[in-house]
Amino acid sequence: MEDEAFLATVPPWSGRPDSERALIAPLFERRAMRAGDTLFAPGDRLDGLYVVRSGLVRVSDPDGTPLALVGPGGSFGERGLLADGYAPTRATAVEDGAVLVLPAGRFLALVESDADLRAHFEGAAAGWRRRAARPRSLAETPVSELMSRDPLAIGPAAPIAEAARLMGERGSVRCSWPKRGGCWAS
């Protein structure tokens, strides 16, 4: 009953009639998680749809770039389940807690038989795809990709134009806005 009451607060389950939720809630399996646990990795066969009961889970792409932090009431795993049944991402517990897992076969049967659930989870999967496809922000870019392997050193008295010329010769700067006698660096 405790998980049924919890699901009553979590979309899309909160929008289901009480009698239907009473039938669906026992299908979920509660699993404990410890900070650092990998719930699934890219390429793993997915057990089902995950709903965070307590704690926090980080979902990241195969490179380790964080896509989302999922807290209580949030779900994940639908993208892979609706595609081919395999995880395209990694899910890692950030905090101790618990997840509710709706087994893959049960999830797919529910989504197949209910247009509202299908619309909800297909929309969520599309959101994950958009986040995964977007370019990384500067904050998400590994420092190693931002650093030059062979840094350019120039004295403090050197004019900026000289530094720009040297950087241009090394290919460190591309000329986006040409101007007479040089370019504006981008």
Image (cartoon, grey):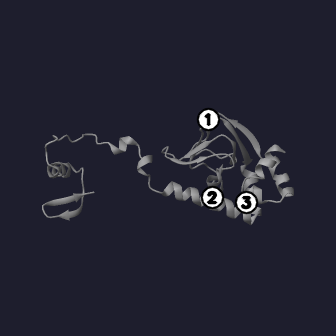
Q: Is residue 64 left or right of residue 125?
A: left
Q: Is residue 157 left or right of residue 36?
A: left
Q: State which quadrant residue 154 falls in.
A: top left
Q: Earlier in the sequence, mark 3 or mark 2?
A: 3
Q: Could you tell me if residue 42 is visible in this image?
A: no
**Label 2 crowd bin: few (<14), some (14–19), many (20+), radius 10 Å:** some
Q: Residue at x 81, y 43 (%)?
A: 2
The one of 122 and 5 positioned closer to us in this rendering: 5
**Quadrant for the C terminus in the image:** bottom left
Q: Is residue 173 left or right of residue 118?
A: left
Q: Earlier in the sequence, mark 3 or mark 1?
A: 1
Q: Could you tell me if residue 57 is visible in this image?
A: yes
Q: Is residue 145 left or right of residue 126?
A: left
**Mark 3–mark 1 CB contact (< 8 Å):** no
Would you name the residue on which mark 2 appears? Answer: 124
Residue 152, percent from left and from top: 21, 42
Whole-Å distance between the Cαs marked 3 and 2? 13 Å
Would you name the residue on which mark 3 appears? Answer: 111
Whole-Å distance between the Cαs marked 3 and 1? 28 Å
Residue 120, percent from left and from top: 68, 61
Q: Residue at x 76, y 43 (%)?
A: 29
Q: Residue at x 82, y 54 (%)?
A: 21
Would you name the residue on which mark 1 appears? Answer: 37
Mark 2 lies on a secondary structure that is helix
Residue 125, percent from left and from top: 61, 58
Q: Residue furthest right?
A: 19
